Amino acid sequence: MTQIIIIIIVAILIALGSGLLGMLRGGSSGSDKMFKSLVIRVALSLFLFVLVMFAAFMGWIEPNATMMAGSHT
Amino acid sequence: MNEQEYYVSSGTYWPIIGSIGVATLFVGFANQMHGASWGGSIMALGFAILVFMMFGWFGQVVKESTSGMYNSQVDRSFRWGMSWFIFSEVMFFAAFFGALFYARQLSVPWLGGADNNMFTPELWDGFSATWQQIVFNTPGATLQSGTAVSVPTQLVDTWGLPALNTALLLLSGVTLTFAHHALRADHRNNIIGWLVATIVLGVLFLGFQITEYGHAYHDGLKLTSGIYGSTFYMLTGFHGFHVTVGVIMLTVILYRVQKGHFSADNHFGFEGVAWYWHFVDVVWLGLFIFVYWL
Amino acid sequence: MTTAIAHTDGHHSPEKGLMRWIKTTNHKDIGSLYLWFAFTMVLIGGAMAMVIRMELFQPGIQLIEPQFFNQMTTMHGLIMVFGAIMPAFVGLGNWLIPMMVGAPDMALPRMNNWSFWILPFAGGILLSTFFMEGGAPAFGWTFYAPLSTTFAPDSTDFFIFAVHLLGFSSIMGAINIIATVLNMRAPEMKLMDMPLFVWTWLITSFLLIGAMPVLAGAVTMMLTDRNFGTAFFDATGGGDPVLFQHIFWFFGHPEVYIMILPAFGVVSHIIPTFARKPLFGYSSMVYATASIAFLSYIVWAHHMFLTGMPVAGELYFMYATMLIAVPTGVKVFNWVSTMWRGSMTFEAPMLWAISFVFLFMIGGFSGLMLGIAPADIQYHDTYFVVAHFHYVLVTGALWSIIAATFYWLPKWTGKMYNETLAKVHFWWAVISVNVLFFPQHFLGLAGMPRRIPDYSLQFADFNMISSIGGFAFGASFILFTYIVIDCIRNGKPTDARPWEGAKGLEWTLEPKAQYHSFNTPPTRALIEQESQHS
């Protein structure tokens, strides 16, 4: 589960970076590229949020706050 | 301005005013920390000078831009400038995320005796090398600087405000995207509506963030609560600062939209701020995942 | 040439008086400001070095308190790195890059002004720490925690803010250079047409933007550890002082390439000019520079072999460090091959450039020695390290700055310096600098630690030799100052191209380059004719 989350985060970062490149290019093609990338990044972010909430609800991941007992040694 | 000609800017006082402002701000801040009663006022003065500089400098650039003094080359220079400025911000956050990962994955387990058992697992009575609980059950412990460690009585809540705040901020990304779309499709009224929604969501986020700080502080989680408190507050604090800056920039953009500064195919000011907001949004998502969950 | 000169004094000429310098948005004015600022800082930092060498002239505490000695070593390092070498290269970049890429000015001229005008404030704040209670920072230029957090004087907070300001300045300067190179370049100039100084500065800018914010993060954590009770670098709160070293060197290692890559660029201009041959292996130079820059981000912990690191980490950082020798070797090979069978003459810039190749290589090889983890146990924190980084920074970075000064001074002033005096200056400096730093290798191998005001008797002779070399080298700057000022005041007027073998767009401008370099972009034919690798 953790790996999936991290993969999605990386994908979000790539989409965000691609939006930056679009902004850098400018003009109408750059503007299109920027807008499309940012739509992808928003959609992925929402999906990730829902996924994390759902995974937590199902007990697949736990917030680090509940790693209460014991120590790591 | 002619596309073939180069734009050459006139001389300017704003940079030296900015330098004076930022130096005054820092000198005031340093003296404030060292207990000088006048430090705070000097700091405020420096901040005021900086704000004055920003109004003046940006105002001049906006005026020159709307009066058509810039050609597409100047526009591209601004794009390069903004992009690499944001990249430098990314690297600034990277330093703090790096500190978080290093502490989480390496140094705290090492303190607990992991890997080589060179470190004592017992730094003090009741020490637990568990993330978040690193300073739990350790009343009376002090840092090297002599500062007393603040021991939290409760763990940070993950489900309530943080989850709500994440939803709010992600939603603001959605509304901003709608505003962006409206701008590209030249629907002036829709832009303003979606921009206002984005700003409201940003302000709500900040409000809830302050509330959450209040709760955490009340439960004893402070900057002085060891490495967890340090990374928690510094990461979320710098993020909150960036949200504040983002809200201010969005407000300026809202004003400029009303003034009709942007067109469907020429709106770099909007694009720069929008990307900044998306960046701040993604940083929060990273914070939410890495600070609260994983 | 014709198109450029037709538009002299295009938009406006400089204003008069002090306000010209405060308000200026001209790349040449700002370049000059940077260079004079850096020169002032070299003299201040050099004076501190003289104090250090005076104290070390003989064993025992002679002249100054150990605490003050530590302030001297710390401030000498900080001022030379952040106040002298870096601003000097930004100054050279400002002066030369727009001329070399066929642009009228920098891309963001107002921000260019700001990135300079932050510097005097940062320098002022840094130097003011000397007059504060507890004195200036005394924990070494690397300001390791907890020396810089728990055990440092109050003035450290001013030092932290000075570093923040210097960081702003560097980041803005770097952004400006990227925007200039990528956006203001003459439309007919392809990336692989760019002169190497432009290439190396472009790559350096990416290093600056990646590394300086991390330094800002490190000093911010220091600030909160010192004043707000955070525990980033404090193990009693679950933090780790070693974390500081990781963050610092993640900045610090790219930083050393920030200070040497533009130097590579300068030398790659001077050697072809005086060998009267095109640069050998132009594209391999570009790729080597990029590889060095990339590698610089993944080798930082070779500064920390003795700090405590898993063995796998030591091995990785050792091998990655060794890799850097490959692209650097490519560069040295290319410089030597450029000179091979060239019809060489030895004017002052060429003398500096050749001695750069030779002496920088010594510094590079001692770096390789330091990069071997098991051997580093012997060398770590000794004078061997001091000798190593002074060979790369003084006879490397500073050498190239002086070489560049003599090489482009005719273009900056329209006048020629006194070649005889310049040759005397060169031999004076090159001999004294080796007397100064070479014995420090022996001192380090024999075990003399760095950053100490006193030492055991067996180190006495080499230290005295080193100090004598130091005073002589310090005195050489008096001659340097005289030569430069004499050139500005009384130099003989020169041609637009004072070096017959020189290539580059900057030489097509007027003898004293006009205020705004190119008002119309140079043509393809001109660019090809002035290309470094035709």
Image (spheres, coloured by chain):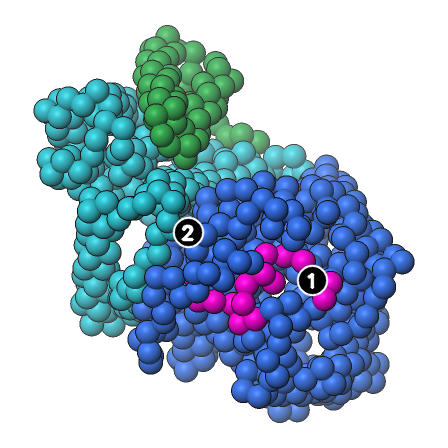
Chain colours: A green, B cyan, C blue
Q: Position of residue C323 (x, y in %)?
A: 76, 43
Amino acid bearing label 1: Ala
Q: Which mark is residue C209?
A: none
Q: Which residue is mark 1?
A: C502
Q: Chain of mark 1?
A: C
Q: Which residue is mark 2?
A: C107
> How packed is label 2: few (under 14 Cα within 10 Å), some, or many (20 or more)?
many
SS of the residue under disc 2: loop
Residue C493 in sight here: yes
Residue shown at 34%/10% (left/top)? A54
- Is the same chain shared between marks 1 and 2? yes
From the viewer's perspective, tell me whether residue B17 is left or right of residue C212.
Answer: left
Q: Chain of mark 2?
A: C
From the viewer's perspective, tell me whether residue C153 is left or right of residue B242.
Answer: right
Q: Position of residue C456 (x, y in %)?
A: 78, 80
Image height check: is C400 above or below B182?
below
Residue shown at 33%/80% (left/top)? C17
Do the numbered discs 1 and 2 sit on residues whose CB atoms are within 8 Å? no
Task: Work out how far the residue at label 1 is from the one at label 2, CA to CA, in angstroms.
Answer: 26 Å
From the viewer's perspective, tell me whether residue B21 is left or right of residue B83.
Answer: left
